[in-house]
């Protein structure tokens, strides 16, 4: 800390030559002058340090002490500042930079969008640009009402939008319109078909005409509940079939993976490249993008200049790091391959039977064939195989024609 204080206030290194140079030191102590670092060169020469402001006083009373003094050199911030006094560029440059920072506070250099799920960021950014909000725009002239009305007019999928400015950062919050749920149309021509093949254990028909009974086997895509409901005394009614069909199903799922694979081993060689992105222009500080003859991974990191949460500049520092690696062949342990394949086939089975389905019994087998691990899952399940499907015009016409033929007979 003392050294930093000396550098901040400045000091002078003085050389005193005389018959008794110690008399000069005693006079300094009597006058209350700070000095330190006293070192004798010989019996008649002393070198010491003192504050810059005391150098002239020491010169004044040195002859009374029968000494000659010489200021060897001066150090510290006051000395350096005096040197820079006529270098106008060096002391005006910080002022210019500070002025630019203050001015950049009033311009948008980053736009963050939150709350959107189906509407893309690009679509919102394009609408904002047409409304006057874009990178480099002057935010004090923004009008929330005009921005909101223009953006909502261009993007009907949005029901609300808010633009908040924090320094040079604009935070855009949006809310999307909620889709109106589709109403159940009782007169829509819908039939229930089998989503999977299986043996029916239970049928619950709410609307429609059941074509299968408990214990019968249904193949995939076969119609289980028809949307055409025949009537003895009236015309065939076309309805929106509704119901559930619980059936026993069987699956055989197979997964295969090689036991040998290629992995990366990093050699330790790496090199970094730097670039600047100013606005939409990129300045590279390197002549080529690759340095290794072998394969390498390219890791890119970007950092925007500014103070987070206060303001940001349109300047991004880009660092590209290339890590060289070599490819080596590695082997997968059979136990690990067996467990991995078992997890994969079980996940696939759960996906097929759905969250409401259940697995009654299962058998998992594992084998290795020609360097490949093979996992097979055979399972019996219980699930709802009912799936809605729209009736074709031909099916509707055929159902009505059958009723007309029956009435004619």
Image (spheres, grey):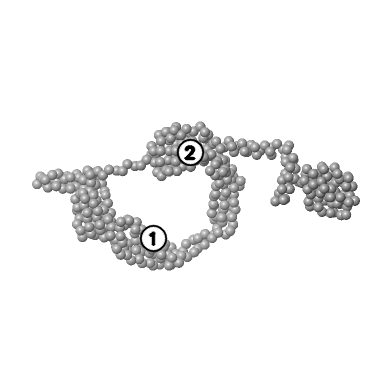
Q: Quarter-wise, where is residue 352 in the image?
A: bottom left
Distance CA(mark 2)–CA(mark 1): 46 Å
Residue 266, can we see it?
A: yes
Residue 287, can we see it?
A: no
Residue 385 vertical position relative to residue 107 in the rendered view, above or below: below
Place of residue 179 in the rendered image (x, y in percent of width and height, measured from the top left): 34, 42
Q: Does residue 78 appear to the left or right of 302 in the view shown?
A: right
Which residue shows up at 84% across the image and 50% down it? 26
Judge the density around disc 1: few (<14), some (14-19), many (≥20) Cα neighbours within 10 Å. Answer: some
Dot 2 falls on a residue whose secondary structure is strand
Place of residue 62 in the rendered image (x, y in percent of width and height, measured from the top left): 86, 45
Which residue shows up at 23% across the image and 51% down it? 243
Judge the density around disc 2: few (<14), some (14-19), many (≥20) Cα neighbours within 10 Å. Answer: some
Which residue shows up at 25% across the image and 57% down it? 246
| In front of the other: 277 or 371 | 277
Q: Does residue 173 appear to the left or right of 363 in the view shown?
A: right
Dot 1 falls on a residue whose secondary structure is helix
Residue 164 - label: 2
Q: Quarter-wise, where is residue 102 in the image?
A: top right
Place of residue 15 in the rendered image (x, y in percent of width and height, measured from the top left): 84, 49
Q: Does residue 60 appear to the left or right of 99 in the view shown?
A: right
Residue farthest to the front, as pictured: 30
Q: According to the image, label 1 marks what residue?
A: 344
Place of residue 66 in the rendered image (x, y in percent of width and height, measured from the top left): 89, 47
Marks 2, 1: nearer the viewer: 2
């Amino acid at each position: 800390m003392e050294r930093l204080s000396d550098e901040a206030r400045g000091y002078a290194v003085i050389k005193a030559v005389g018959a008794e140079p110690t008399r000069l030191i005693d006079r300094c102590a009597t006058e209350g002058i700070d000095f330190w670092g006293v070192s004798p060169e010989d019996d008649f020469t002393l070198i010491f340090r003192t504050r810059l402001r005391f150098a002239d006083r020491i010169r004044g009373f040195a002859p009374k002490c029968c000494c000659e003094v010489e200021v060897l050199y001066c150090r510290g911030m006051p000395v350096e500042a005096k040197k820079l006094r006529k270098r106008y560029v060096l002391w005006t440059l910080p002022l210019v930079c500070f002025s630019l920072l203050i001015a950049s506070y009033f311009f948008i250099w980053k736009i963050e969008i939150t709350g959107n799920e189906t509407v893309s960021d690009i679509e919102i950014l394009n609408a904002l640009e047409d409304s006057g909000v874009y990178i480099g725009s002057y935010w004090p002239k923004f009008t929330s009402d005009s921005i909101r009305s223009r953006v909502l007019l261009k993007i009907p999928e949005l029901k609300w939008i808010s633009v908040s400015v924090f320094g040079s950062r604009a935070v855009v919050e949006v809310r999307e319109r909620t889709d109106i749920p589709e109403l159940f149309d009782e007169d829509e021509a819908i039939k229930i078909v089998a989503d999977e093949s299986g043996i029916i254990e239970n049928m619950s028909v709410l609307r429609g005409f059941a074509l299968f009974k408990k214990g019968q086997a249904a193949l995939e895509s076969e119609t289980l509940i028809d949307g055409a409901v025949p009537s003895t005394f009236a015309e065939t009614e076309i309805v929106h079939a509704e119901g559930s069909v619980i059936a026993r199903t069987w699956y055989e799922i197979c997964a295969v993976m090689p036991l040998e694979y290629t992995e990366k081993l990093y050699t330790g060689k790496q090199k970094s490249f730097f670039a600047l992105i100013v606005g939409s222009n990129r300045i590279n500080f390197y002549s080529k993008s690759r340095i290794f003859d072998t394969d390498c991974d390219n890791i890119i990191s970007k950092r925007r200049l500014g103070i987070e949460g206060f303001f940001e500049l349109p300047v991004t520092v880009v660092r590209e790091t290339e890590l060289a690696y070599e490819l080596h062949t590695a082997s997968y342990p059979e136990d690990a391959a067996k467990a991995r394949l078992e997890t994969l086939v079980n996940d696939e089975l759960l996906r097929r039977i759905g969250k409401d389905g259940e697995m009654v019994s299962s058998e998992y087998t594992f084998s290795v064939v020609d360097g490949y691990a093979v996992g097979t899952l055979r399972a019996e399940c219980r699930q709802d195989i009912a799936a809605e499907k729209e009736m074709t015009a031909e099916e509707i016409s055929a159902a009505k024609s059958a009723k007309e033929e029956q009435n004619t007979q």
